[in-house]
Image (spheres, rainbow, N blue to C red):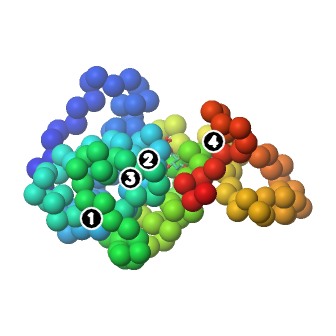
């Protein structure tokens, strides 16, 4: 595969770190034989797609890319890659996604960007699930030290009160996450 060399000079510290992590993950884990590829969500994933595009038009013409939500669908389409669905491709060669925090045993907090169920389906369906995380996401031990905003949870709308009660019974302090430019709570890509 002929990928271009790293070009990090024009990016700021955190963006450069995201891109370096994404490029390294793609170089190591998205190979010539990977044809069905799951693309995750978040601000790191555009660099994943950038590197995949650099692997070349010929190789990518034989690949199908499955999105975990609106953002990754747009990324796939706007980069001229072939869009597919898990219904048609239930076995995925590799899914590559971001994370909010990762501990030394590779447990992770995900969902900070409010993507949940679709990410989990594409992760579970993948022969290889690769998480891309820059230095800020390293947990020194217990998850919740680097990502302090709580564990994101998705609930079906009709069950929200029950989920809040159940999480409280388990010792949690659930907070309904409100949308920023809309009235009411955040709605995930799964509705
Ligand atoms: O819901 C969002 C996903 O789980 C993201 O992969 C995660 O939040 C990491 O996003 P970012 O790359 O923006 O830090």
Is 183 drawn above or below residue 8 in the view shown?
A: below
Secondary-structure class at tag 1: strand
> Does dot 4 land on a helix, a strand or a loop?
loop
Disc 3 + disc 2, Cβ < 8 Å: yes
* Residue occupying the point 17% across, 38% down: 5
Q: Residue furthest front?
A: 183
The residue carrying mark 1 is 64
Q: Earlier in the sequence, mark 1 or mark 4?
A: 1
**What is the secondary structure assignment of the residue under circle 3?**
helix
Which numbered disc flags the more N-terminal residue, 2 or 4? 2
Characterize the local packing of mark 1: few (<14), some (14-19) or many (20 or more) Cα atoms within 10 angstroms. some
Q: CA distance from mark 1 to mark 2?
A: 17 Å
Give residue 91's position: percent from left, percent from top.
37, 76
Q: Which mark is residue 158?
A: none
Residue located 78% across and 64% down the image: 159
The residue where tag 3 is placed is 73
- Write down the residue under mark 4: 147
| 113 vs 44, nearest the viewer | 113
Q: Position of residue 120 (x, y in %)?
A: 53, 64
């Amino acid at each position: 595969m002929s990928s271009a060399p790293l070009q990090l000079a024009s990016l700021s510290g955190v963006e450069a770190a995201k891109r370096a992590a994404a490029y390294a993950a793609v170089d190591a884990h998205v190979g010539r034989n990977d044809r069905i590829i799951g693309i995750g969500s978040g601000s790191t994933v555009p660099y994943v797609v950038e590197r995949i595009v650099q692997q070349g038009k010929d190789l990518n013409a034989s690949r199908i890319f499955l999105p975990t939500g609106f953002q990754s669908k747009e990324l796939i389409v706007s980069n001229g890659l072939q869009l597919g669905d898990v219904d048609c491709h239930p076995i995925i060669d590799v899914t590559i996604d971001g994370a909010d925090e990762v501990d030394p045993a590779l447990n992770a907090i995900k969902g900070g960007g409010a993507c949940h169920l679709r990410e989990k389906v594409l992760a579970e369906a993948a022969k290889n699930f690769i998480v891309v995380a820059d230095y800020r996401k390293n947990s020194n031990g217990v998850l919740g030290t680097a990502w302090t905003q709580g564990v994101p949870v998705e609930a079906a709308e009709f069950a929200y009160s029950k989920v809040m009660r159940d999480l409280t019974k388990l010792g949690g302090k659930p907070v309904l996450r409100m949308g920023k430019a809309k009235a009411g709570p955040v709605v995930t890509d799964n509705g």
